[in-house]
Amino acid sequence: MPQALRHTLLSMRDLLATAGPFLLLALVLLFVAYEVLDPNPPKKVVLATGADQGAYAEFGKRYAAALKQHGITVELRRTAGAAENPALLRDENSGVDLAFVQGGADVEYASTADYEAANEGLVSLGSLFHEPVWLFYREASAQRAFGKPQLEALADMARPGDWKLNIGAPGSGVPNW
């Protein structure tokens, strides 16, 4: 055997003997970390939506179909709406993993600090869509309540009168005034 080849083989053997245990240990640690930490997304999640005919229920169906293509099963849970959904997320025993929540719907807190403390650990993934405010009223009702058939601003509704404003169903996240 030529001297150069023998020297190369001995060097490889020494390298393997020196680095081999470290390489093997690193591979074992990576495998254990992968198994213990489980970086893969869950195969099943529960998504709290809202009423059957609402926008959140429709979006839930779309998300379920999209995630199914990636091997994730989405169980849709019908709820009263955006007011119930944050409470389900906060309750670790509810079984809810994800929920649609209307911005500003969770207004039961006296301060920002109280709100942040109650929602610690919850993360927003983003915004689905804008929710505009539409105001419809009867001219006869406005005439009776305010003495004029047309309102000029939302502030006009603050005047006393027998005006009732229905914004959403109870539990929908938007209060009725």
Image (spheres, rainbow, N blue to C red):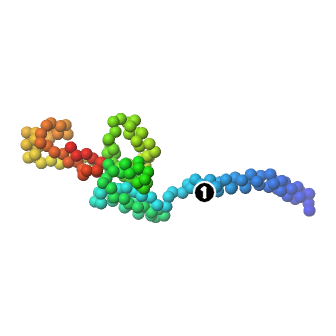
Q: Give the quarter of the image for residue 46.
A: bottom left
Give percent across and percent down for residue 169: 24, 52
- Say if 30 sits above or below 113 in the image: below
- The answer to whether residue 134 of the structure is visible from this angle is no
For the point 42% across and 61% down, which residue is it? Answer: 74
Task: Residue at the far front: name it.
Answer: 93
Q: Mark 1 belongs to which amino acid?
A: Glu
Disc 1 crowd, CA 10 A, few/some/many (<14, 14-19, 20+): few
Residue 160 falls in image quadrant: top left
Where residue 11 sits in the image (x, y, percent)?
84, 54
Q: Residue 144, how many percent across, how many down?
A: 7, 43
Q: Position of residue 151 (x, y in %)?
A: 14, 41
Residue sitting at x 30%, y 60%: 52
Task: Please indicate whether residue 22 sits to the left or right of residue 2 in the image.
Answer: left
As drawn, is 74 to the left or to the right of 23? left
Q: Quadrant of the C terminus?
A: top left
Q: Which of 134 and 117 lies nearest the eye of the viewer? A: 117
Q: In the depicted view, which residue is nearer to us: 157 or 148?
A: 157
Q: Dividing the image into 4 quarters, which one contains the N terminus?
A: bottom right
Q: Nearer the viewer, residue 126 or 73?
A: 73
Instruction: Using the rendered view, name the quadrant where residue 120 is placed.
Output: top left
Q: Is residue 176 above or below residue 114?
A: below
Q: Residue at x 83, y 53 (%)?
A: 14
Q: How many marks?
A: 1
Q: Secondary structure at mark 1?
A: helix
Horizontal placement of 59 versus 34: left or right? left
The answer to whether one can see residue 84 in this image is yes
Residue at image mark 1: 35
Residue shown at 25% from the left, 50% from the top: 170
